Structure formats: structure tokens, C-alpha cells
Amino acid sequence: MNRVLILFAHPRYEKSRVNRALIEGIDKTKGVTLHDLYEEYPDFNIHIAHEKEILGNHSVIVWHFPFYTYSAPALLKQWMDIVLEYGWAHGGKSYALKDKIIFVTLTAGGTRESYASNQHSQFTLREFLRPFEQAASLCKMIYLPPFAVHGTHWLTDQQLDAYSNLYNRLLTRFTTGDFDITLLRSYAYLNDWLPDKG
């Protein structure tokens, strides 16, 4: 069984209807660890050795956050800057996270259609996530397409339940190893893969 680590970073979680629905009860899913960075480090004083130990115990890593101004909240960026350090995660002969699977889960107010060259956001979501992809590449990790929940302000309870169930199914697939990396990389979003799997 693969162990999945969700690095959850939401500075206003108490006000987030969508993220609450996505992660509620997720830590009860066998093989999944929910690591709430803002809960753990409200003062931004990240315990680097502790984070490295947690990473070492998991084979699938998820950066989960609300998409604020086309990027991640500040604490996750700080986490990346000081935990994925040279000489441990990359550089020299040390690649401690090599071949671990990693992807982004995010929530965004804009619709999926708005993320295109001829639309309001001007770029695709995948283009906005290039720094995360490159960070994963630098560490020789296996980077996958994102799981994204768009149009968060307009979701009905039924739609939100569907996203929550989809996310849970996705994480379960990763814990059981029921996936093909090459196939997953062919999708724009991981959301698109799951309906094909039934």
C-alpha cells in the first residue's frame, strides 16, 4: 500500500466551505495522512527535520491549497523554500524525494473555462502551476496533473459532494496503487481520469 501525505495549506480554513468538504474525514481514509500546515505552524516556524521525516514515510505527496492570486498561500511557499533544500531534496548526490509521486490539489473561484489564453485568466491552470512542476522536477519527483475544483462560489451542495467523493476516490486509488503513471500524465486534470475508471 502507498501512503499519501496531504500538505494542506489554507490560512482561512474556518471560512472555506469547499476545502472543508474536501478534507472532512479524509484522515480516516486508510493510508492517507492530513498535515495541516497552518494548524501546525501558525507562527511560520517550520520544523524542517520533522517535515523531512514525514515526507520520508510517504510515497505520494499532495500540495493542497486555495488558489490565491494565481499561486499558493505564503506558508506553503515557505515550506517549499526551506524543506526542499539543496543537498537534501536536490543538488549534489542527494535526492531524498526521488521517484515520489506529487501533484497539486486546489480550489479556485474562476471557472475551468476562464483559464485559457483567450479568457479572463489569460493562461491555463497548468501554466500557472509551472513553478510547482519545476520544483518537483528539480527534486526528481514524478509530477502529475492537478486535481482542481473550479467555480467554488457557485457550487451547489450536490456538486460539492460529488467533488468530495471524487477526491476521496482519487486518494484511495493512489493508496491501492490502482493507476498508471503514463495514462495519468495524458490528462489535463486528474479529475478527468476518474470518470474513465468507473
Image (tube, rainbow, N blue to C red):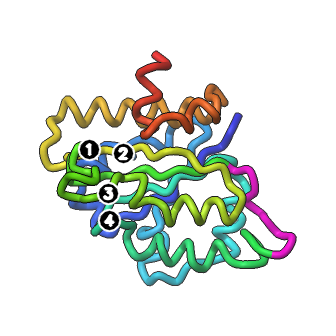
Residue type for callout 4: Tyr
**Could you tell me how far apart the alpha carbons at marks 4 and 2 are, in whole angstroms?**
13 Å
Residue shown at the point (56%, 34%) measured from the top left: 184
**Could you tell me how far apart the alpha carbons at marks 3 and 2 are, in whole angstroms?**
15 Å
Q: Main secondary structure of the magenta part?
A: loop
Q: Are marks 2 and 1 in contact (CB under 8 Å)?
A: yes
Q: Which residue is mark 4?
A: 70
Of callouts 3 and 4, the N-terminal one: 4
Kind of element beneath mark 2: strand
Of callouts 3 and 1, the N-terminal one: 1
Q: Which residue is mark 2?
A: 148
> Magenta stretch containing residue 133, yes or no?
no
**Could you tell me how far apart the alpha carbons at marks 3 and 4 are, in whole angstroms?**
10 Å
**Could you tell me how far apart the alpha carbons at marks 3 and 1 are, in whole angstroms?**
11 Å
Residue type for callout 3: Phe
The image shows residue 75, relative to residue 178, as above or below, that is: below
Residue shown at the point (44%, 83%) measured from the top left: 43
Q: Which residue is mark 1?
A: 112
Kind of element beneath mark 4: loop
Of callouts 2 and 1, the N-terminal one: 1
Disc number for residue 123: 3
